[in-house]
């Protein structure tokens, strides 16, 4: 039985929930021990020890199949907050879309296979925004850009590992959007003519959610992501 994790606004506060069997359960009511170490950290309690926690969640989902304890009404799209409140790092890998790099960013000779990966950070406490929320437009920018991304949630600390070992540390997946102020990022007045911090790290620049689906239920090679802006694909 598949399940997902989310954080919703309930009683004016962020509340971790488990979605399974077509119902939503308040995690602190059905499995308080999973949040006991630091309840205020919400779902962040689960991922540093995901290997063990996931097994407990699987058993919990089996027990909840016939129970009604902790069930709440299905959240509306505007009830969802960013799932993690807040992760230690938000690392993004750039230059993922060829057509975008060629046409919007203006790098006609870009070839990802021939270069180094492009990584950058967004500040977790100010850039993350929950699903369905309105974001604050960076008023100084006249060229706001958007890219849909597959968000990868890491479930344990890894360092200097192989590709396969890194993949085994993936706890789950979510959907994210990378908002960019292109005229800040590619400002000709910048000493290097390129500023990932100014163009990428502004407030509300990383919508994330609505939920985290454990990796055991996801084949990332078969996913299709679509982004519509004012109804246009």
Image (cartoon, rainbow, N blue to C red):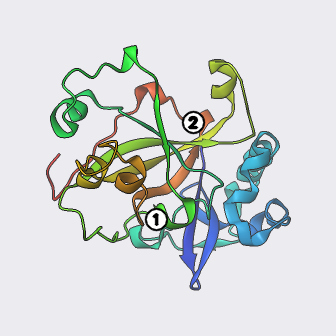
Residue reaching furthest front? 191
Q: Residue at x 60, y 59 (%)?
A: 84
| Label 2 element class | helix
| Residues at circles 2 and 1 in contact by the CB criterion of under 8 Å | no
Q: Nearer the viewer, residue 8 or 161?
A: 161
Q: In the image, what residue occupies the spot 67% across and 18% down?
A: 162
- Give the Cα distance between marks 2 and 1: 22 Å
Q: Residues within 10 Å of mark 2 (few under 14, many from 20)?
A: few
**Sequence-wise first label, 2 or 1:** 1
Using the rendered view, name the quadrant where residue 70 is placed.
bottom right
- Look at the picture and state if 34 lies above or below 193: below
Residue under pointer 2: 217
How dense is the environment of label 1, judged by Cα within 10 Å: few (below 14), some, or many (20 and up)? many
On screen, residue 193 above or below 68: above
Q: Nearer the viewer, residue 195 or 12?
A: 195
Q: Quadrant of the C terminus?
A: top left
Residue occupying the point 37% across, 50% down = 178
Residue 47's disc number: none
Q: Is residue 221 visible?
A: yes
What residue appears at the point 25 percent right and 32 percent down from the top-left corner?
A: 101
- Residue 54: x and y in percent read 74, 44
| Mark 1 lies on residue | 130
Element type at marker 1? loop
| The N terminus sits in image quarter | top right
Query: Residue 36 placed where, x, y %?
Result: 84, 66
Q: Is residue 219 left or right of residue 155?
A: left
Q: Is residue 16 left or right of residue 28?
A: left
């Amino acid at each position: 039985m598949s399940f997902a994790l989310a954080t919703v606004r309930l009683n004016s506060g962020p509340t971790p929930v488990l979605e399974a069997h077509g119902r939503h359960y308040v995690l602190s009511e059905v499995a308080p021990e999973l949040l006991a170490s630091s309840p205020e950290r919400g779902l962040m309690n689960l991922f540093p020890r995901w290997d063990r926690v996931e097994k407990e969640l699987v058993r919990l989902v089996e027990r909840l199949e016939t129970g009604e304890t902790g069930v709440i009404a299905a959240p509306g799209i505007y009830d969802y907050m960013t799932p993690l409140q807040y992760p230690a790092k938000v690392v993004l890998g750039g230059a993922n879309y060829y057509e975008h790099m060629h046409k919007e960013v203006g790098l006609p000779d870009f070839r990802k296979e021939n270069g180094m990966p492009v990584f950058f950070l967004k500040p977790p406490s100010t850039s993350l925004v929950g699903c369905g929320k309105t974001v604050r437009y960076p008023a100084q920018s006249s060229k706001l850009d958007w890219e849909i991304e597959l968000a990868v949630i890491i479930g344990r600390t890894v360092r200097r590992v192989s590709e396969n070992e890194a993949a085994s540390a993936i706890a789950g997946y979510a959907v994210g959007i990378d908002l960019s102020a292109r005229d800040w990022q590619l400002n000709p007045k910048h000493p290097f003519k390129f500023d990932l911090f100014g163009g990428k790290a502004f407030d509300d620049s990383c919508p994330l959610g609505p939920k985290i689906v454990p990796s055991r239920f996801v084949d990332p090679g078969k996913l299709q992501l679509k982004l519509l802006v004012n109804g246009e694909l």
